[in-house]
Image (tube, grey):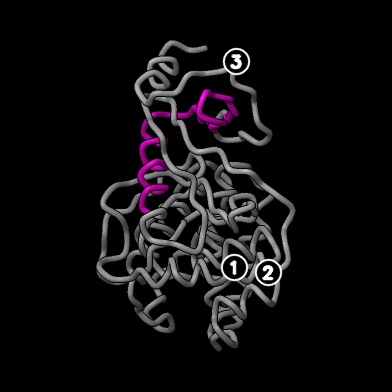
Amino acid sequence: MHRELERLMERIGLTPLGEPTALAGGDIAAVFRLETDQGAVVIKRDAAERLAGEAEGLTALREAVTRLVVPEVLGREGEWLVMEALAPRRRASGGEVALGEGLRELHAVAGGAHGWHRDNACGTTPQPNAPLVDGRTFQRERRLLPLARACHDRGLLDQRLRVRLEALAEGLETWLPDAPASLVHGDLWSGNVLYTERGPAIIDPAVYRHYPEVDLAMLTLFGAPSEAFFAAYWNGAAPEDWPRHEALFQLYPLLNHLLLFGGSYRGAVERTLDRLARG
């Protein structure tokens, strides 16, 4: 076992029983399960700054919700993060209803500026969070324009698509209303939702405050939430402007995937811009 991890385990009062076992996934960071004298824990190894942002995000989510399970941070040192291990189970009846109700509770934590008091990361992509009062400005200056520029600089986005993205970003005030900034998970694709014996759980956050549709759009982009989920979340019917908001807030994760994984996501970016152009 790595000496730094040994020191961390000693500091938080856990005695390992054996060696860490690698878990599936781990595309961004190495993730392990370790049995200890006080039960199993999950260990993540990644860049220290990214782990600091994740640990803070998990703590913020735990403090904000009672209807969702969020793993407790047990300790962090350098490139190691130790968390409570969750016990996944097959999705039970009512699980998506509970997820919808839990996200509604999370997003009700609203107020203040859009952003966060520190930058963090979405995957390995640095995520600038310097607060701005207006949500349209935040979406433009902290999300769409930086990633459009980064993708263009790497040859992943041609000039035509970059111009379309910039025009969309500059015109947000013409149709997107400003709104209170909700606490959001920030990277809520389906793989970051687990169903456990204690209820639905959310993991691997990239938290900040922004439009709540950030989380919903990510769920529909890389997953298929049921009608029961949305009925529980909205406590009724979808808002009339949801389809256009869904497309807008899918652009950022699509650009991030284009940056991280290459040109196979370029077509999805263009199709999403087409959806937005149709209104």
Badge 3 crowding class, 10 Å Cα cut-off, few under 14, some 14 to 19, many 20 or more, is: few
The residue lying furthest to the front in this view is 37
Tell me which residue sits at (58%, 25%) in the image.
Answer: 35
Give me the C-alpha separation between circle 1 and circle 3: 36 Å
**Location of residue 245 in the rendering, given as x and y in whole percent from the top left corner:** 52, 76
Q: Nearer the viewer, residue 50 or 18?
A: 18
Tell me which residue sits at (38%, 30%) in the image.
Answer: 76
Which comes sooner in the sequence, label 1 or label 3?
3
Given the image, on which type of amino acid does mark 2 rest? Gly
Q: Residue 112's image quarter? A: bottom left
Q: Which residues are magenta?
A: 31-60
**Location of residue 202 in the rendering, given as x and y in whole percent from the top left corner:** 54, 53
Tell me which residue sits at (48%, 47%) in the image.
Answer: 122
**Location of residue 130 in the rendering, given as x and y in whole percent from the top left corner:** 27, 54
Q: Residue 233's image quarter? A: bottom right
Q: Is residue 116 left or right of residue 245?
A: left
* Circles 2 and 1: CB atoms closer than 8 Å: yes
Tell me which residue sits at (39%, 65%) in the image.
Answer: 139
Q: Is residue 254 visible?
A: no
Identify residue for label 2: 94
Given the image, on which type of amino acid does mark 3 rest? Gly
Q: Label 2, secondary structure: give it.
A: loop
Identify residue for label 3: 18
